[in-house]
Amino acid sequence: MLEPVDMIFFGAHPDDIELSCGATIAKAVKDGLRVGIIELTRGELGTRGTPKIRRREALKAAGILGARFREQLDFGDGGIRTGRDEEMQIVAAVRRCKPKVVFTMWPDDRHPDHIRTGQIVAQASFLSGLRALETDLPAHRPQVTIYYPQNYLVTPSFVVDVTKTWKTKMRAIAAFKSQFHNPKSKEPPTFIADKKFLEMIEARGRHFGALIGVEYGEAFMTKQPPKVDDIIAAYEGREP
């Protein structure tokens, strides 16, 4: 059930968020912040598993990460609808949860659902702050919409040090047993079920970590640069 949180992470399908943001969620929770997760589809067009199985896996993963809630909307896998009704469902979620920060997918990705997710969430987060747009909930606008990459590498606006929560992220990913590498599985082979896919996730985490001089990192993009109060501290322990 939706409740007030500090951050909401939006994704297109079950497991999108874990792959790109799982360690950041775990870190935020560890730091005492309240986090919610919302995905826009049930993942019904996935090659492996079923919506019921994926929902069960998603809830388990959310528990591992420490999210306050995980809601699943039904905008249509493989063709996410971005009409007014869908937009207003996201507005309602943002107004009810009152997050300071909204995370969503970078709106230029390999999967059309990822593109549409990034677009509709950013637009709805803005509309949520319009007082003249009347609903049964008061207007609320988050401080910022932050984007995360999925398939394509994009130059990050900032990288979060997630070294201490990387193992938690990987446990959350492993909760999606129907989707990722399992040598005993009889499901059809897919790109993400290949062992090399999880090795790529590991390598990407190490790559982003190396950019900021730590073991593991997760990258994010914003349309506006983040505020830096202490330039020296921001680059402490780094070399040009």
Image: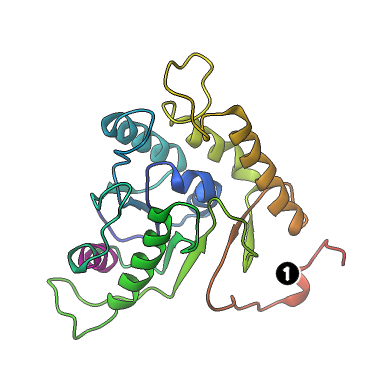
85 relative position to 178: left or right: left
Q: Which range is magenta?
A: 87-95
Task: Give coordinates of residue 156: x percent, y percent.
Answer: 63, 64
Is residue 35 among what the camera can see?
no
Q: Which residue is farthest left?
A: 136
Number of marks in the image? 1
Residue at 30%, 71% (x, y): give it: 124
Q: Nearer the viewer, residue 236 or 222?
A: 222
Within the magenta stretch, is there residue 237?
no
Q: Which residue is farthest bottom?
A: 132
Task: Give coordinates of residue 106: x percent, y percent.
Answer: 49, 62
Tell me the quarter of the picture where residue 135 sits.
Answer: bottom left
Within the magenta stretch, is there residue 88?
yes
Above or below 7: residue 1: above
Is residue 163 among what the camera can see?
yes
Above or below 166: residue 150: below
Tell me the quarter of the picture where residue 132 sits.
Answer: bottom left
Residue at 43%, 75% (x, y): give it: 143
Task: Give coordinates of residue 216: x percent, y percent.
Answer: 68, 47
The quadrant of the rendering that contains the C terminus is bottom right
202 relative position to 14: left or right: right
Above or below 205: residue 230: below
Q: Which residue is mark 1?
A: 234
Task: Give coordinates of residue 213: x percent, y percent.
Answer: 78, 56
Q: Amino acid at mark 1?
A: Ala
Q: Main secondary structure of the magenta part?
A: helix
